[in-house]
Image: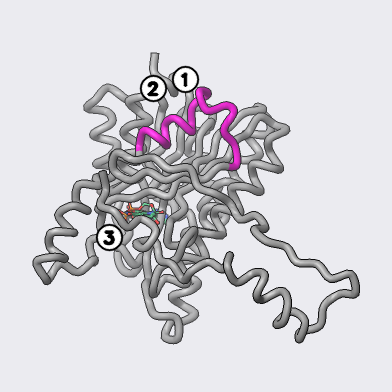
Amino acid sequence: MGMLDGKVAIVTGAGGGIGREIALAMALAGAKVVVNDIGASLTGIGETSATPGEQTKAIIEQRGGQAVTNTDSVSEWESAKRIVQSALDAFGRIDIVVNNAGILRDQIFHKMTPEEWLAVINVHLNGSFFVSRAAAEHFRAQNSGAFVHMTSTSGLIGNFGQANYSAAKLGIAALSKSIALDMQRFGVRSNCIAPFAWSRMTSSIPAETPEQKARVEKLKRMTPEKNAPLAVFLASDAAKEVNGQIFAARNNELFLFSQPRPVRSAHRSEGWTPELIAEHALPAFRAQFQPLDRSGDVFSWDPV
Ligand code: NAI
């Protein structure tokens, strides 16, 4: 018995990288899989291709699993609805949605163009909404369903040159929590994974000096499939008590993330003026200010 026997999963962006590994693992766990991918470049600019998705489907079938491909984009409402419809057409139901499709348009903030902003928000944040929303009606009707969304430590913690991506990825964490709150009453769960993987998204990390080369060799150990067991677990009934949570997977490590809560309070019975905030609240809060950390400052040790 597989953990996902009888279930139907949509994995967006499953033509390569992390999405492919999640699709393969879900199929091995018994799910029938819709392999969605437009076969985009890393930036989403240029030609698209059905080949990456077909390759994932072929691997699933070689291993005795069942899959169909779909090449609709997640980033528009009408095409997102077709992705969900393709699961219904091929397999008659939908139980699992993995929002994984993504692109990058890194740029330092003062040079980021509106086009770079919108392209990334459209695929990651709007795409996660569109596909989730299209599936939600079916989840509501059948009183079950599981969402797994890919967030990122670039959004949860921070990174240089990724304002568009960080905003989208932290937005996805809030989207996931909102879905969990709104749909818990229908037996629907929604959780996030901040994955780590050596993929084309991370392969631009510089490897020029001997130290950088050594570091990149260690990063290459973080293969995309290391993220798949957590995705399969979260999608399965074994995770029925897990809802609205944020996890990370990094080679052989798993993490549960905190979510923002007040860490200090200050009160004055007569209320505040800007001067009083400077005089009283600032010294009270200062010790708890978050440093301007980036993901690499927090995950400061090599992957285990
Ligand atoms: P990848 O670039 O290898 O895969 C992304 C896939 O999404 C590609 O196959 C691409 O064709 C597809 N795609 C792009 N736009 C699409 C659209 N509009 N509709 C459907 N498919 C589309 O990237 P990777 O590394 O596998 O990342 C997967 C997810 O994990 C992304 O959401 C990414 O942001 C997230 N992530 C990855 C990290 C890493 O270390 N690789 C770190 C943190 C998050």
The label on residue 123 is: none
> On the image, which quarter does residue 33 sit in?
top left
> Which numbered disc, 1 or 3, marks the residue that appears first in the sequence?
1
Front in this rendered view, residue 32 or 82: 32
The label on residue 6 is: 1
Question: Which class describes the residues within 10 Å of circle 1: few (<14), some (14-19), or many (20+)?
Answer: few
Q: Which residue is mark 3?
A: 202
Q: Secondary structure at mark 1?
A: loop
Q: Secondary structure at mark 3?
A: loop
Please identify the dominant SS of the magenta region.
Answer: helix
**Residue 151 locus on image (x, y percent):** 47, 53
**Residue 144 locus on image (x, y percent):** 62, 28
Q: Residue at x 48, y 25 (%)?
A: 7
Question: Which class describes the residues within 10 Å of circle 3: few (<14), some (14-19), or many (20+)?
Answer: few
Q: CA distance from mark 1 to mark 2?
A: 7 Å
Q: Amino acid at mark 1?
A: Gly
Q: CA distance from mark 3 to mark 2?
A: 30 Å
Q: Which residue is mark 2?
A: 30
> Which numbered disc, 3 or 2, marks the residue that appears first in the sequence?
2
Let me know if residue 157 is in the magenta part.
Answer: no
Point out the image quarter for the C terminus: top left
Q: CA distance from mark 1 to mark 3?
A: 35 Å
Front in this rendered view, residue 69 or 112: 112
> Which numbered disc, 1 or 2, marks the residue that appears first in the sequence?
1
**Residue 43 locus on image (x, y percent):** 34, 67
Q: Residue furthest left?
A: 210
Q: Are marks 1 and 2 in contact (CB under 8 Å)?
A: yes
Q: Is residue 300 visible to the viewer in this orientation of the structure?
A: yes
Judged from the image, the quadrant occupied by ligand 1 is bottom left
Q: Is residue 72 above or below residue 206?
A: above
The boundaries of the magenta stretch are 228-244
